[in-house]
Amino acid sequence: MAASRDSQPQTIYLKNYKVPDFLIDETHLDVDLQPSATRVNSRLVMRRNPAAADPAAPLLLSGQEMKLLGISLDGRELNEGEYELSDETLLLPNVQDRFELCVSVQIDPAANTSLEGLYKSRTMFCTQCEAEGFRKITYYLDRPDVLSVFTTRLAADKALFPVLLSNGNEVESGELENGRHYAVWHDPFPKPAYLFALVAGDLEFIEDRFTTCSGRDVTLRIFVESKDLDKCDHAMRSLQNSMRWDEEVYGREYDLDIYMIVAVDDFNMGAMENKGLNIFNTSCVLAKPETTTDLGFQRVESVVAHEYFHNWSGNRVTCRDWFQLSLKEGFTVFRDSQFSADLNSATVKRVEDVSLLRTLQFAEDAGPMAHPVRPASFMEISNFYTLTVYEKGSEVVRMIHTLLGAETFRKGSDLYFANNDGGAATIEDFVSAMEEASGRDLSQFKLWYSQAGTPRLQVTDEFDEDAGVYRLTISQSCPDTPEATAAEKQPFHIPVAIGLLGEAGNLAIHLQGEAPDTETSDNTHRVLELTEAEQTFAFTGLPERPIPVLLRDFSAPVKLEYPYSRAQLQAIMSGDSDGFSRWDACQKLAVGVIEDVMRAHRGDRNYQVDQALVEACRAVLNDQSLDPAIVALMLQLPSEGYLSEIATVIDVEAINFSREYVKAYLAGALETELNAAYQANTDTGPFSVDAAAMARRSLKNTALTFLVKSGSDLYVQLAQQQLDGATNMTDEMAALAAIVNSDSALAQKLAPVVLNNFYRKWQHEALVVNQWLTVQAACPLSDGLARVQRLMQHEAFDIRNPNKVRSVVGAFCGNNPVNFHAADGSGYEFLADRIIELNKLNPQVASRQLTPLTKWKRYDEKRQALMLKALQRVKAEEGLSRDVFEVVSKSLA
Ligand code: B3K
Ligand code: ZN
């Protein structure tokens, strides 16, 4: 069981950072694995840090949830009076300047349901140490600025755990008595404890190789349970592609002789970049066409890449302290998004990233947990693995890339890696390398790291026809966030990429007062730099009043307001050269049309769907020059999550009703085109996961979803045919969801049957069953809570498995707004019950699941009261984990 605390958690501040008093040159671990009584003996070669402030400081080690068996200092056993033990620390008041410390502890991995530290996942032992899990394995200086060379000896029962792995290279192995065996691993690269890993299990592996740019041969292994061996090829290819890409684009070569990935079923997040031994959630490694959707394939590719890229941005150069988390996470997300953009469609990737950011990160920025990309304080660091640190952090790096250009950015990243290799760095180190490479002053830009909240840009324009001068005036502001009021915030340095669109296409851009030679090769695209609260940019030589295409490629994570007419949006949709802006114009048009219906719905008036949207969508469907994936994205209406994020007060029912209404209307009006798109994009040949094939499936299934929405039995039957004949999970799942989510009589008659058949067919594939759970938990039809309660009783559900919790609780509370926000508050009470239950088992998952309740201020008064009541009930619970306490108390503050 996870430990609970007696006292209120302390807040930790960035401004109080101090260098460690001690360093650990060598860490020798001897781990004797037993499910309920694992013995960990450590031998630490330590010395005082010459840079420490206090040359006589006592030695304070972190450690929790373990039984101390013995301590010796330089070979002498210490008695109880020579150290002080508390729930979370071990203090040795008197140590020399150099010494060897040996500590022996006993831990209970089988009872560790927090999935942090050493734990059991099904039949295997594995670890998760980031951020502060190592202190559950042994007493240690568990902080990222203490780097040590690790040697790890593992011993376990050979029949049950034939494979024994840790970081680095295996240097020894052999047999022991009683059917046990051992292996010794040595990692030559000094690393912080959060990158330590061990695995023991009955695993098999696929193996391949990679020859690095300097000609070194690296062995690549992916370890899984034998039943999953047929699902590793895509991850292996993704790994090889990542290794090649990082050499080509960032000049980064892999450093060890072996790279291992292990897949485990019970994992709190996607994956972990432990040095040389990545541990992955099965959902982010395993993929084969029959069981995995295209989205699943893409996720595997990007997570494999992300963890691989951490070998440089995270491992070779790590973080000085956890406030710098975005230094490795923001940068690595940026790197993996560049990789995915390069390997697949750049526009599709950009649209997906921006949708996530605008829906979920913007909501985080506007809620009680809002924090800067580099937070100034926290109670529990696990709560700060957020969309802000990851996705907004990536956008901040992207802005530097935009401001500097690819070539200079690369010089900056080379400098950053060279200057900080083998060390623990800060965000300043990163930005100053970029400054040095570019000769630019990024001090104002750094406000992106310290000021929370989503900046708001308001744009007005005027055109002087006689002079041919067009002026754009942009003003910026940033709303209040917990750490600062709007008035306290300073203007950001914001790159605003623009185009100017004329009747016949994009116009040449001449910025007034700028010498012609500063123009870029593409004179129809410019990056304006907004640095003041308000700034005017004048463009000369314009033959006509242009339509401004603002924030192309989403050049900054801001909310931009400009009063576009629907005709202007249509013009951008069909005429601009930036794929992202075309999609964005379509979204804006759809938002306007859905809002029309919402207004009519509230006022009980007749609904009218603006033909502009219908015709725009028709044009998109008929445009043979467009990538089918883009067509699919343009047709998909803005999500309920996004519509909620931009609403003043979130009216869940009106949002759901209006969006569904417009969808059904489009389905009817565009039936012919949708049908044609369905037929034209149905592949009969062999299955492929290349971008073109995925694009066709995406459009085909988008068309199917619309067609089923039209209500005609014909299309429900089409979905059933697709379900029965599918040879891949993308088609199968899309058809299943279309039937389950349709309220037509035929679909509702079919739904229980197809769900049952599906379960019977896939019950032995956990990842497929999770998708089956999600489809049902997220189904917006009435009685959602009853459905979810039934799912929780199903044999396939297990509250100890985070993937199952996300598939049922997460999908219902986060992805099924009409049911979760039921007017009687039953959804809120359900979530509070789950949080209370999970708090004891797995605090990290519990606190993550709380997110929907933290947004209570965004709803009507009745719902606010009910959400508050649920939060207060959680807060009143005895023994709240630090994780849940922090989120719940900040939400109620
Ligand atoms: N670095 C890990 C995240 C660890 C989360 C710990 N609560 C995975 C990643 O971002 O690559
Ligand atoms: Zn990461």
Image (spheres, helix red, strand yellow):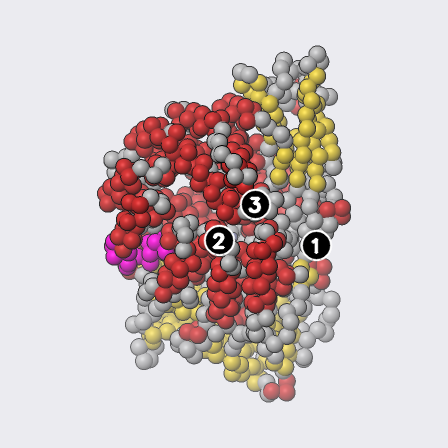
Q: Position of residue 128 (x, y in %)?
A: 48, 64
**Is residue 766 among what the camera can see?**
yes
Q: Position of residue 339 (x, y in %)?
A: 47, 41
Q: Position of residue 79 (x, y in %)?
A: 59, 87
The quadrant where residue 673 appears: top left
Mark 3 crowd level (few <14, some 14–19, many ≥20, 10 Å Cα): many
| Closer mark to the observer between disc 3 and disc 1 | 3
Q: Which residue is mark 1?
A: 483
Asked whether 771 falls inside the magenta stretch, the response is yes
| Mark 3 secondary-structure assignment | helix
Q: Is residue 28 above or below residue 651?
A: below
| Mark 2 secondary-structure assignment | helix
Amino acid tagged 1 = Glu
| Mark 1 secondary-structure assignment | loop
Q: Which residue is mark 2?
A: 814
Q: Which of 76 and 455 lies nearest the eye of the viewer?
A: 455
Q: Which residue is mark 3?
A: 645
Instruction: Please give the name of the residue rendered at 50% of the width and 47% of the height, measured from the top-left corner.
Output: 653
Amino acid tagged 2 = Gly
Name the dominant secondary structure of the magenta segment: helix
Q: Which of 98 and 319 lies nearest the eye of the viewer?
A: 319
Magenta extent = 757-774
Instruction: Please give the name of the residue rendered at 41% of the width and 55% of the height, measured from the top-left corner.
Output: 784
| Closer mark to the observer between disc 2 and disc 1 | 2
Which residue is farthest top? 466
Q: CA distance from mark 2 to mark 3?
A: 13 Å
